[in-house]
Each structure stands twice: as C-alpha cells, then as structure tokens.
Image (tube, rainbow, N blue to C red):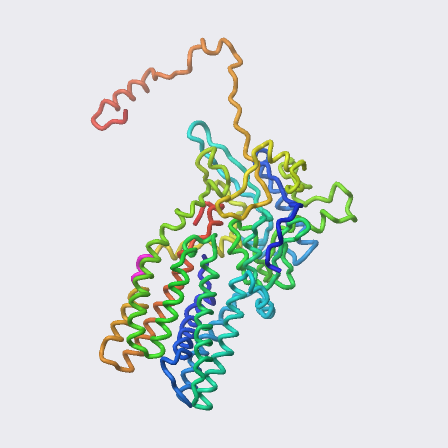
Amino acid sequence: MHPAASVIIFNTFSGLGFGLLFWLGMGVLVPTGWGAFIWFAIAYLFAVGGLIASTFHLGHPERAIKAFSQWKTSWLSREGVCAVFALIVMAIYGAGLVFAGTRLGLVGIIGGLASLGVVFTTSMIYAQMKTVPRWRHWTTPAMYLLLSLGGGALLAGQVRIAAVLLIIGGILQIFAWGTGDRRFAEAGTTMATATGLGHIGKVRAFEPPHTGTNYLMREFIHVVGRKHADQLRIITIGLAFVLPVVLLLLPFSHVFAALAVLAHIVGVLTLRWLFFAQAEHVVGLYYGKR
Amino acid sequence: MTQLPPSSAKKLGLVIDLDTCVGCHACVVSCKGWNTENYGAPLSDQNAYSGAASGTFLNRVHSYEVQPEQGTAQLIHFPKSCLHCEDAPCVTVCPTGASYKRVEDGIVLVNESDCIGCGLCAWACPYGARELDAKEGVMKKCTLCVDRIYNENLPEEDRQPACVRTCPAGARHFGDLGDPDSDVSQLVAERGGFDLMPEQGTKPVNKYLPPRPKDVEPQIDILAPYLEPVAQDGAGFAHWLDKALSALPGGAK
C-alpha cells in the first residue's frame, strides 16, 4: 500500500492526541486554570491537527460533511462521528477545568472513552480490509489502542503507566509483524485464484494492460518498504518503545522526558510508514506483483 | 445508502469468454470513449503524449502465460472490469453513501456529486475495478453502460454495454445472470463459468468462461510412423564431440 504522508501524520498524531484526551478524561491528571488550558491545547493540537491532515488526501475535502452519514456500515463514517462527539464532550470537560476549576467526572469518562473509540474506529478501517491480509487481524486494533494509550500516557507524564504500556506495545508489535508476514500466504489468494486459470498450469503475468503505470499500481503496489523492512523494524522498536522506556526509568528530568516523547513520535511515524509500505493488497496479483 | 439491498432477482452482468478473447483491447477503447463522452466525469489522462502516460480506465486487458505441467505454454488474454458483486465490499465502506448497489438490477454505481474521493472503496475491491480520477478527484468505475442499456434513443442493437457491442471476437456477453434461463446463464452452465477470487466472498455477478482444452492433433498419415525419424541420435563430428565432452570429468551427460 502506498504510504501517504497525510494518513501517516493523521494516524500518528491523532492517536497521541486522543490518547492524551483519554487520560485527561479519566482524571489521571486533573489540571485546572491555565495549566488545564495548556494540556487541552496540546491534546487538541495533536488530535485535530491529525484529523485535518487526513483530509489532504481527499479528492473533494469540501464535501467531507457527507462522510458523517453512513455510520451504519462504514468504519470511516463511524470514525468521523466518534471524533466529533469525543471532541465536543472533551471540550465541555476541558472548559469545566479551565474556567471553573471543576472536574465534571462523568463527562470526562464519557469523553475519554469516546476518544479511545476514535482510535478503535480508525483501526477498524484497516482491520476490515479482506483485500489486505496483513491488516485483517485483531493485532491491528490492539496495536492502535496500545500506541494511543501508551503515547498518551507518555505525553501526560505518567511514567509508570507509559512504561508498562510501551513494553507491552513493543512485544505485541513484534508478534504482529511476525504473524503478519505469513498472513498473505494464509489468506490463500494467489494468481491462480485471481485469474481462475490455476487448473491449467502455472500462471505468470505476461503482458500488463498498459505500458505505463496507473492509479491501482501507484496506490496498492509498493515495494521499497519491504526491501528495508528489517532495518526499519529495528529502528521502530528502538525509537518507539525501548528508548522512551529507558529514558523514563532514568531519574526524572525534563530533558529526558522531552527526548522520550520525541523518540516515541519518530518511532511511531516509522511504524506507521511500515504499516502501509509493508501491507500487500491482493490486486497486485493481477499485475504479477505484490 | 451504502447498506447493500436485499439480493435482487435481476442481476445484470457480463460473461467473458477467455477462450475467445484475442486481446485486441477494442473493449478498452470503446469503454473509454463512451464513458468519457457520456455519463459522469470524463476519464482523464495525464501526460498522454509522454513516456510517463497514465490515465483512468474502467476496463483493462491483462495477458497471462499459463504453463501446464506437460506441453506448451498458453497465452490467455484477460479483460477485467467491475464484477458488480452481490456482496460488494466497496459499497459498505463508503462513508458518504456515494457508492450504492441498485435494487432493480444489481448494478454498482457511484453518485459522483457525493464522492469525497477518499479512495476507501478502491482499497476494499480485490479486483482493482475502481480508479480515482486524477483530474476530477472522484471514484470512477464500470456502470455497465447504464446510460446505454435502457436508452430508448439508441437503436435496439446498441442497448448493451459499449465493450460488448464492440467486441469483434464475440468474447463478451451481457445479460441477466439472476435468470437461470437467460442466454448468459445457460452459457455459464454449459461452459463451467467461474468466479474470480471466490475466497474473498464477494459473490461476483460477472462470470469468466475458461479456455477450452487444446485439441490433440490426430495421426492423419498412416505411413508417418514408418518413416525414418529425424536424427535423434547424433551422428558425425557433432556426435563425437558430444560424447567426448561428456566423457571428460564433470562433463554434462
């Protein structure tokens, strides 16, 4: 799959932003006044900034309002509805803390859970794709949630929670990669089933439909990511999980904390790039490519 | 609405005969022509006259080489367009309701004025039947020439999809695959028509007919077996050289 910058930025930063909103909503940290304003500003900058970035890859972003209508069947629509709901509820909760210094407990819990709901619905957009076997697995939503919770806790300065979640996240990510590498073969879609010609013999793509490239090949066939997958995986594990945990376990300093957040963000950006670049869509089989 | 309608009785679709297709790409051209000049946004090209030409097509012809265990390889031309699946995954993922499957005849269409160009339907389609137009920013797909098949302004023989109408080999057939007595259904039953990627669970309406088994040429000349065979054992210098080199240590036998 083509790793579009707008979608990678959205997945990384909105995940962190909604993760931070979750911990704020749950009352793990209860800032008031200006302090609360700064915390909520950071969370909204990440969450909303990511959402805005995600509209950059649309052909017609001006019609985006229509995307709220099909929540009965579409995970993308559900994500939109959930995001607007979470942002409104958390704005009410945040306003209580900033202006009145009061914690509206129930509002926070509803808003926090809705924030996680955004991350879950996002992950299901990918996990539902039967055409991309690597994504179609429970580890996809699990990793989205863990990264959001872990990254959110890291942003919120919750050392213990962040360390535990990042360690679990790192282990689960290695598991997801290991099992994901086999999933295309396990799904059983091959050039033989794609063409229905397998009963005659071995099928090979002889001549493509056109001499140039096309939308399908640009969007679904991406080889560069797989070439350097091993190195990128090591970089991802190091930056997104190991380095932040090590920095958190050292005696606390603001420099270390900032470095931990920075390393985590760069690591998650790499992780998301790999998430797309390594994923193979079955349509590539028609072109004899993957 | 992106909820799929209950299975319609009428299932309009195509039957493509892989035995007959000669790979001339006439269906590709006629499809591009009709669908650029008629319903919806035109199918744009980018850098059409350069080395990096690219464009939107609703129908493309691949060619595959199939190598049986015994005998020579076969070349099979393989036209591919939207299969108008009964369980169309492209429809249910659409966030805006732009993609829909018609109740009356099962055709899968895009309402272009509602399409935000998110591309998710193309992700969900295993067949590569949908292409986002680079100029218009909306999703394009085969309409089964919905603006021809019911068009009373056209002569009756033209009321079929452009690709079917133009195919010089008669490799494309259009009809109601929901009716077991229709010509296309009969053809599918007779020739063992099959689905593409059945494991994806999309239940395509369009069917493909497999290439017929190759004929084995009968022995016409009764004297042929008695004729001296064309040199099977080598003779002369080349034969001696072959044996001499084979006798060397490590020589090929």
- Highlighted range, magenta: A229-235
Would you say residue A117 sits in the magenta stretch? no
The percent position of residue B124, horizontal first and vertical second, equals 52, 55
Does residue A232 appear in this view? Answer: no
Q: Is residue A237 visible?
A: yes
Quadrant in the picture for the N terminus of chain B: bottom right
The residue sitting at the left extreme is B249
Q: Main secondary structure of the magenta part?
A: helix
The residue depicted at 52 percent of the width and 64 percent of the height is A76
Q: Position of residue B33 (x, y in %)?
A: 67, 50
Q: Is residue A232 magenta?
A: yes
**Up-down relation of residue A22 to residue B187 (above or below):** below
Q: Nearer the viewer, residue B230 or B80?
A: B80
Q: Residue at x 53, y 69 (%)?
A: A80
> Left or right: A233 with respect to A220?
left
Question: Which residue corresponds to the image point at 39% horizontal and 16% vertical from the top-left?
Answer: B231
**Would you identify the image quadrant in which residue A275 lies?**
bottom left
- Where is residue B16? Give x, y as percent: 60, 39
Res A33 quadrant in image:
bottom left
